[in-house]
Amino acid sequence: MSNLLVSFKESVKLSDKFLWLIIFLISGFSLALMKSVSLEGMNYFNIQLIAMTAGLTGAFIISAIDYRILADKWIWIGIFCILMIVYTLFFGISVEGSSGVNARAWINIPGGITFQPSELVKIGFIITFSKHLSIIIEKNKITSFWNMILVVIHALIPVILTHLQGDDGAAIIFLCMAVFMSFISGIQLRYFALALSLGVLMLPLAWKYVLADYQKQRIINQLNPESDPLNMGYQQIQGKLSIASGGFSGYGLFRGPRVANGAVPIQESDFIFSVAGEELGFLGCMSILILLVLLLLRVIYIAKKSCDNIGTIMCFGFLGLVLSQMIFNIGMCLSLLPVMGVTLPFFSAGGSSSACLYLGIGLIQSVFAHRQKSLVKKEK
């Protein structure tokens, strides 16, 4: 026990303090926005605070564990992740009407709490896919066609399972994560070109047999949201109105009239960016973007400093997770992309998403801290 405590203290000491600073600033900003939307009656502030506390506790613990030890357990982690999604498919809770999503993606856990397993599986996928790719690199099989087939199968497992849940937003994020991790691993561009070509050719089949009717309507409506202002276009139109009403500096925190009236559906989660736009204006929106970009740049810095391939790939897996969710969420808030039920990382309400993203930070800190440990040992 004492050795574990010493290891924990050492890892915290060697962790990236600047990354912690960014995360604490983001967390404080998120809690302020949650306090504002909690004026509606639902106390999102308390839920977010609990999720952040649990997530940060987990992050500190994971940062003390060598990420390579976690990676060595990749088979068991992968099996656990698959079982969680399969269990949710059969015994999960179906939630309808959340930004067009009709998904069986949540489960009940003791204490009357619901949990979304796919959020934890995203972190598990970073570990398993990183290990898979690092094994191929070590064996110098990165150009092997059959190994690429296995990589594609690995990537498609969470994509297909979350699609079967009805959570295509999560499926798209898994796909983006796989692309980022594969690219940084050195997989040849011809394989990306082949995958892209096959994807384009399969679009008609996906439109006819894969997409649900409401998803098709959202894509069609994206071309002209004003054509259906009281139904499919309502959320995005109201979101843009809230952002525009804030002007340069906004009405002030907790003073947004549209926020108080709940003018934007799901404003605490998918459209939290509209809350920042109304109450804090252009300055608030830019502050969110700057903080998230700083986070991404710091993750890239740590990736470059990693002492092995697996650490670098893990960092880019987390980068792909945060960047893709950031682009899709802000894109749909600005009516640049269809609504797909993707949250803004660290800012949106959602205990599962928030807590698990912090676990990802713990994984990145582990990569940094154990590189530092290696350097200290070399100096001795």
Image (cartoon, helix red, strand yellow):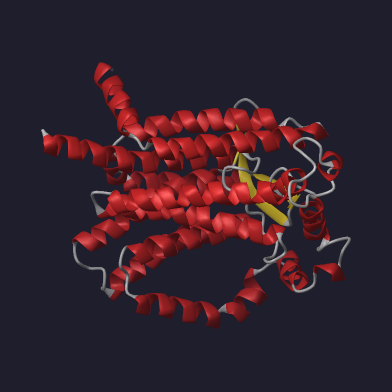
Instruction: Tell me: residue 279, above or below residue 182.
Output: above
Q: Position of residue 22 (x, y in %)?
A: 49, 40
Q: Foreground residue, 302 or 144?
A: 302
Seen as rendered, the residue at the extreme top is 2
Q: Residue at x 37, y 64 (%)?
A: 182
Closer to us: 105 or 122: 122
Residue at the front extreme? 248
Q: Which quarter of the rendering shows the C terminus?
A: top left
Image x and y of residue 53, in percent? 54, 28
Q: Can you tell which quarter of the image residue 13 is in?
A: top left
Residue at point 54%, 36% (across, down): 25
- Left or right of 1: which side holds 84? right
* Vertical placement of residue 10 versus 132, above or below: above
Tell which residue pokes out farthest to the right in this image: 230
Rendered residue at 38%/60% (across/down)? 181
Left or right, 251 with respect to 16, comes to right
The quadrant where residue 225 appears: bottom right
Residue 8 coordinates in the image, percent (x, y)? 32, 26
Residue 145 in sight here: yes
| Residue 81: percent from left, percent from top | 45, 46
Which residue is pictured at 66% across the width and 52% down the height?
103
